[in-house]
Image (cartoon, rainbow, N blue to C red):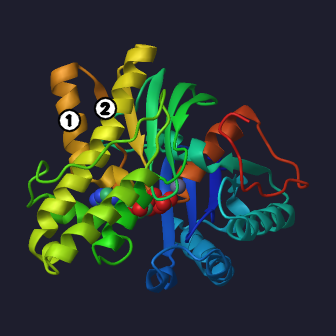
Amino acid sequence: MTDTKKYILAIESSCDDTSAAVLCHTNVLSNVVATQEIHKQYGGVVPELASRAHQQNIVPVVHQALAKANIDKKELSAIAFTRGPGLMGSLLVGTSFAKSLALGLDIPLIEVNHMEAHILAHFIDDEERTKPTFPFLAMTISGGHTQIVKVTDHFTMEVLGETLDDAVGEAFDKSAKLMGLPYPGGPLVDKYAKLGNPNAFDFPKPKVDGLNFSFSGLKTSILYFLQRETQKNPKFVEENINDICASVQHTILDILMEKLQMAVDQTGITQVAIGGGVAANSGIRAKLKEAEETLGWKTYIPKFEYCTDNAAMIGIVGYLKFEKGKFTEQSVAAKARYAIGS
Ligand code: KG4
Ligand code: ZN
């Protein structure tokens, strides 16, 4: 009897994580992520180093994903890959690898938009979590992105708002850096914030029209605030780290929640799904839970491994596109700027 199951190999290499996953329909059989540690010493992602590390990682990561899934490459039905958006040098590695493998195996190639994948990660089968129903609002918050998207169906999405400068994860990381914390500082800000007073210090919130965001002004105001206070007391940061982190986090979360509330008011949609690395933040999780209780929203957060950059989310889009016969030509090129729905 022939196996009619479909197996998708997915490849993600848009930023600083090299990842490969194997999915059988909507089930994840493996999801291997090689996080590039080299960037830590530079306090942020260095594009040229990221591209080189992807070249070193891609073959072993794909091998590992196939081995963990116990699937031979001859059993694969299609190869899905991140076409963009992301760092060009990084995207090129995954794109070229996926194209050659699909050509060699003579199976379909499927391009995936990384931002759509963050959203469709909610449709990965996961016994512990329910999936959103259409339409819903998706807020993707990470070190590279901050977007609110209206999702009408798997392939109909509209960006309602996005950041005009820094991403929210960058706001966390850059604030942390100003306090002398190592990269990425987001998780540490979250940790110290739990012990501090969120109203200890006041930081101004940006005035941005509509559903767009801006975080660069916050970073500047934190810089001036810390310079002022450390002039008076050189140990200011050390002595007040919990309160500073709690106040910074409180300001960032207020900005996010205000825009989400606006999006809910504008669209009348009360199903809210979040994704991206910042979705790990304990404060945003608490705020969404509170909104369920006080505002009647229904909120969704995927498993953490499907929030941060990973190939399983590329694989779920790959499977959904496979079902619809949405395949990609071998002439496809990576696309650093690649808007949702384009
Ligand atoms: O999705 P991700 O792994 O990579 C991309 O940027 O695409 O997100 C990483 C970002 C970093 O900025 C990191 O500081 C932030 O997510 N992050 C957090 C937390 N965990 C990760 N920010 C705030 N609180 C957290 N608990
Ligand atoms: Zn991402």
Residue at x 34% of width, y 65% of height: 223
Q: Which residue is mark 2?
A: 299
> Could you tell me residue 322's position as x and y percent?
70, 41
Side of 244 where 91 appears, left or right:
right
Whichever of labels 1 and 2 marks the residue nearer the N terminus, that label is 1
Task: State the residue in front, 242 or 224.
Answer: 224
Ligand 1 shows up in the quarter that is bottom left
Q: Please tell me in which quadrant of the rendered image residue 64 appears.
A: bottom right
Give the labeled residue for mark 1.
289
Residue 183, numbered circle: none
Q: Residue at x 19, y 53 (%)?
A: 247
The answer to whether residue 305 shows anywhere in this view is no
- Residue at far right of view: 331
Asked if the residues shown at circle 1 and circle 2 are in contact, with their CB atoms under 8 angstroms apart, the answer is: yes
Marks 1 and 2, how far apart at CA: 7 Å
Q: Amino acid at mark 1?
A: Lys
Q: Kindly state the secondary structure of the residue where label 2 is placed.
A: strand
Q: Position of residue 36 (x, y in %)?
A: 51, 78
